[in-house]
Amino acid sequence: MTREERCAKIEEAIKALDFKGNYIKHERYGNGHINDTFLIQFNQDDRNVKYILQRMNHEIFKDPDQLMKNICGITEFLKKKITKSHGDVNRETMNVIDTKKGEPFYKDSIGSYWRAYQFIEDAISYDQVDKPEDFYQSAVAFGRFQHLLSDYKAESLYETIPNFHNTPTRYQTFKEAVKKDICGRAKNVTPEIEFICNREDDMKICMDLLNKEQLPLRVTHNDTKLNNIMIDNKTGKGICVIDLDTVMPGLSIFDFGDSIRFGANTAAEDETDLSKVSLNLQLFELYAKGYLEGCNGSLTKKETEMLPMGAKTMALECGMRFLTDYLLGDTYFRIHRENHNLDRCRTQLKLVEDMEYKWDEMNSVIKKYM
Ligand code: ADP
Ligand code: GN1
Ligand code: MG
């Protein structure tokens, strides 16, 4: 699609959605790997009002109707709780903007799906940890999110991506990608393939505990990267959990783990100098403290004990997903350079290696909070 064609589609979506005021401009926004995100500006009574407009990734999220039902259900539920505790419903949860016809999303003339949210002002989402305090506050906010949704009807949620964090299923998909090797890239990544295959047994541990009912199925976010939290500019608190596309039944230890693999890494997710990649144990502890505080006693003893395994499993799974996408020709995660998915895979596997090296220390940290 040319730039002009894309702009025309954005403008079609803007016309269909129930924004107030006069449209000024739009620009690409954020660093998400999945959706196309735009900042939209309007003039309302001489005030500049912003919205977030997203073209949902329909290749990945097959059923936008079910996805938006999940999001509307969750945000309405959160709004009731926030109102009860005298919070600000405009900033502490996402607010979906309906279309002029009252639908929560718009399907354009070429079959793309669009949805919009109120823009959360005076807050920022970080792509890496600059101040440990921000990471701690994100932990409290993700923990609180878990706690607030602990009485949400999990069975009412659609599985927006089936088997999203089913690590053994991901492993099967990975092995098929290696076997088919449709791009002829497997020969470049023999050590990475071997590293993953050597850890087949580790991948089953958390899902086995779920199947044996030793870990509870909860309503989880499933994509708890630091940049999916808005941090308030004034108070420094994690004000709002965003990117709700993958809220589904899942494991709390995976929400914990996904945050760790992203935020407690001493390097960026796509760092090419692997000597910079390691697990920062201080950040690991800070996040564990914040997450448990936010959960406010709602995690079981077993869940708490398994937090390190949640972190290792998420790093391993994510590394395997990046490598699968590299082998399949980079069709899932948005890439910005050649071998981007391979670079991302390598940081995750290096992180797994470092977690294995620091395994006893990780477990000792968690014991302090049990
Ligand atoms: P993706 O699924 O591609 O990661 P996100 O929903 O996380 O997309 O959005 C991408 C980025 O856009 C976020 O990291 C955040 O910076 C910004 N963003 C998303 N929603 C809002 C919002 N309601 N208010 C302010 N910024 C937002
Ligand atoms: C994607 O959408 P975003 O950028 O927040 C992905 C996550 C991965 C992450 C890796 C729906 O998250 O599962 O952990 O990239 N989201 C989806 O950075 O697949
Ligand atoms: Mg995101």
Image (cartoon, rainbow, N blue to C red):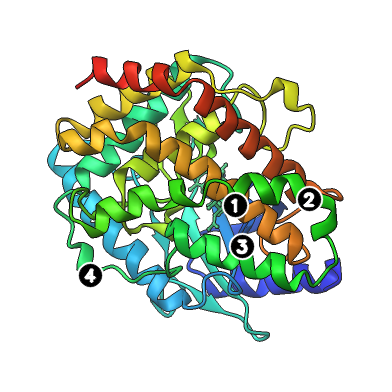
Circle nearer the N terminus (4, 2): 4
* Left or right, residue 161 beside residue 289: right
Question: Which residue in the protein does label 1 denote?
Answer: 197
Image quadrant occupied by the C terminus: top left
Give SS at disc 4: helix
Distance of mark 1 from mark 2, alpha carbons? 12 Å
Residue 340 percent location from the top left of the image = 78, 47
Q: Amino acid at mark 2?
A: Val
* Left or right, residue 135 beside residue 8: left
Vertically, is 181 above or below 133? below
Residue displayed at 72% across by 51% down? 27
Vertically, is 65 above or below 42? below
Give SS at disc 1: helix
Question: Which residue in the protein does label 3 denote?
Answer: 174
Circle nearer the N terminus (1, 2): 2
Q: Nearer the viewer, mark 1 or mark 3?
A: 1
Question: Which residue in the protein does label 4 denote?
Answer: 156
Circle nearer the N terminus (1, 4): 4
Distance of mark 1 from mark 4, alpha carbons? 36 Å
Mark 4: few/some/many CA within 10 Å (<14, 14-19, 20+) = few
Distance of mark 4 from mark 2, alpha carbons? 41 Å
Circle nearer the N terminus (2, 3): 3
Residue displayed at 42% across by 60% down? 166
* Marks 3 & 4, CB-CB < 8 Å contact: no
Residue 73 percent location from the top left of the image = 27, 64
Circle nearer the N terminus (3, 4): 4
